[in-house]
Image (cartoon, rainbow, N blue to C red):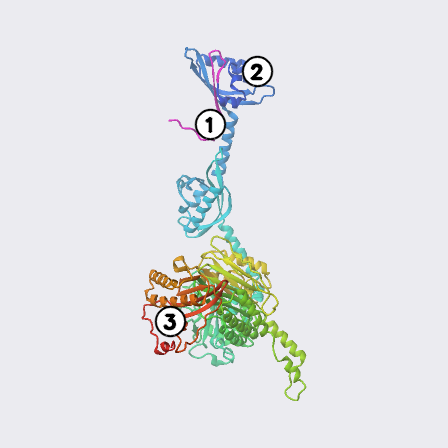
Amino acid sequence: MWQSSPPGSIYDYIRVASFSIGPDGLIEQWSRRAAGLFGMAADEAIGRDPVDAFMPAELRSDGHRRVGEILDGKEWTGLVPFRMPGEGGAHGLAEVYVMPSETADGERAALCIVVDVRALRRIETDLAASQAIFGQSPFGFVLFGTDFTVVRANQRFATVFGGAADDHRGRTVDDYLPGPEAERLGATLKRVMETGESVTDLQLVGPTPGGTGRRHWSMNLYRVHSGAGRPVGVAGLATDVTRRHIAAREAASARRNLALLNEASARIGNSLDLETTARELLDVAVPGFCDLATVDLYQGLLTGEEAAPGSWAPAHRESAGGSAELRRVAHASAVADALPTAVAGSGAPGPGDLPPALGSVHRFPFGSPCATALRSGQVEAVPGDDMGFVQSTLAVPMVAHDTVVGLVQFSRTKGSEPFGERDRVLATELAARAAVCIDNARLYRREHERALILQRSLLPPGDPEAAGLDIACRYLPGNTATEVGGDWFDVIELPGHRTALVVGDVMGRGLRAAVAMGELRTAVRTLALLDLEPAEVLSALDEVARGLGSPGGGERSEGLGGSGGAQWPSRAAQKSREADLSEVYLATCVYAVYDAVTRRCTFANAGHLPPAVVEPGRPARLIDVPPGMPLGVGGEPFEEVEVELAENALLTLYTDGLVESRDQPLDEGLDALRSVLTGPQMALEDACDFVLSTLDTRHGEDDIALLMARIRGLPEEAVGDWRLPREPRSVGRARELARSQLMAWDLDDLVDTAELLVSELVTNALRYGEGEIRLRLLRDRTLVCEVWDAGLVQPRRRRARDTDEGGRGLQLVGLLSAAWGSRRTPRGKTVWFELALPTGAPAAELSVEQLLSMY
């Protein structure tokens, strides 16, 4: 069975050639490889004396002697210098193995096997270099085959992962790394093998065999080829960079310690929120100053007591039962799996001497170091016990204007440097700065909570729901000023399983902005329920905004200014007031209507930031919606853009507080938003939190409204759509279609009611409408029936007189349906009704009054 060596075999590398010498000492046969080695074709070489043709003149006599010996039957192996024929022929050195042979006539001949010594030397050098690089390298070297199993590993690699180098043959990445890291390395190996693109500095993390510590490796991967260019595997060079990571962490810790005071000055007090200020203190202290820390504030301060809750001078603040009530508002730990401030001597109550939980109300026992610090206003040192992991703790009272507002505890674990005198001074300064900010925040909170009550009352209650959409929303008020903003969002259900999504931002701040926001939101809901197109909604809303921003009474004030009655404001003051009000009622808004049946969304924009969408497998993009002018400016029409959204696409509407700040230009914020939205797939609520936590949204310069919707179009089996000719028998046909569709949906309880109401709407379409009739049934959280025709006259419900033979159809629809209505379409109108899906309970019967109302 013949087998061909693949291109790039060993014979190509060592350049083996052959030729034969006849009884007369002349070349009798000449192989192609010999022609390639000596540069002479067969017709030129056959019949020539090889000694005269290839050997230098000074060696020819010895060469003829050797040839004679060979023809006498003696084998010979040796190195023979040769040169190419012709003037200036290249010189070379060949290793020749000559085997005597016989012709058919019994005459002596010879077969010569020739190897280019230069090629052998190159191979030896390459092998030695390869062995030196692979075997003597101080880095872990590993070669994966085409099946991604280890073909070869050097001793350094075996030293890290155990065993001898040969023991690693046949292993896979799963034998070295935990699941997620192994999958990532395996995918990278496959990509390198398929594309040929090398990968540098691939960071991998995992424990060494038999070890518990996490190690860090940097790995470089590249594809290895044979001499003919055929891929034979992937080579990897692994470097242990654990020490580098440790050194980097230590250097960063040293820099944080040097910058601690400067950082505290910059970071503590940027908020007028009590809990936020406490967290800012701990963010600075842990881990730069200590390993564990907690903040406890007096409960009276948090509940809004007018009196100073924690003056340390009066003795009545501490009784035999312990300190006054405190609430734990913040804790931080740089120690994994450690209970925060589980310190000896702190006197923290609870089962097993566990510290108070975050948010819990507690008292420090009488005479404990913490209670003493609160009473005296002086720092108390709390030594750790021999059994715990805390080495020492500083209990530092938070004093502002000679009033103690709470207590902060700084702790260091065993293995850390204990607190010194300088640490006590630094801890006092940190606590004092936070105490002043907390006292200011107490005054702010009292006023700000009242404004927030008004603002929150104007936002949608609960979690919005909509057909074909999973919705999550967040609202974060600004936290650096005493005024609230005018950001708002809304989700409005429209007929036909459509949904209006609204996000807006009133320019300005304070209660006026909040009131304006509420007025505009109410106007949007009213206009949306009229089922207008998005551009029409914004045009009407612009008129509303201009009306709100033009205060009346100016002429009246001027006319009564000289009377002897009450003194009215001057003209200049009135103009100033009008300017202020006009500024408040300028607003931006984006209004979108999503149809769950077609998965198409129509957008209109009034000076707002563009919506963002992420479709599966594609990067996030901003939808190009013409921005238009802000509401309240007037004079410019609004444009609409219709976009078809893919299933599972993520639509995001937001206000500028999410992407713009003093330190971040708008373009950079939008780029950051796109990169975050293209991040990992996760549940919608988690995606909202991920966006807010990843982006720099805590600058507090503006409110943030975020509305995210996952596209879940109605499946085809949840839609029934038919077109009926304009003829009387279409009424019966519509009843049959409705009945069969509801039976297929297992909605037998709704069949009779739906049949009756469908019959009424189709009859009205035949009697009062125009053109072809379209019947559509939609099943989602409710059942919606729509009847379309080309007529423009909208149906109007009226009370039929006793003598009327008809006119009671819409009364029947209104009584038997959960809701009904009509809307305009580009080619006519749609009349619809909605039925609640059966819950298993018996349907409520109509009262006598309801039945009589139809007569």
The location of residue 281, given as percent across then percent down, is 52, 67
Task: Determine which residue is flagged by label 3.
Answer: 816
Residue 45 badge: none
Q: CA distance from mark 1 to mark 3?
A: 92 Å
Q: Is residue 204 above or below residue 406?
A: above
| Residue found at the very far bottom of the displayed protein | 564
**Identity of the amino acid at label 2?**
Glu
Instruction: Answer whether labels 2 and 3 touch (C-beta < 8 Å).
Output: no
Q: CA distance from mark 2 to mark 3?
A: 121 Å
Task: Determine which residue is flagged by label 1.
Answer: 11
Mark 2 vs mark 1: in front? 1
Q: Is residue 387 left or right of residue 629?
A: left
The location of residue 679, given as percent across then percent down, is 49, 56
Residue 58 badge: 2
Magenta stretch encompasses residue 287: no
Q: Is residue 397 visible?
A: no
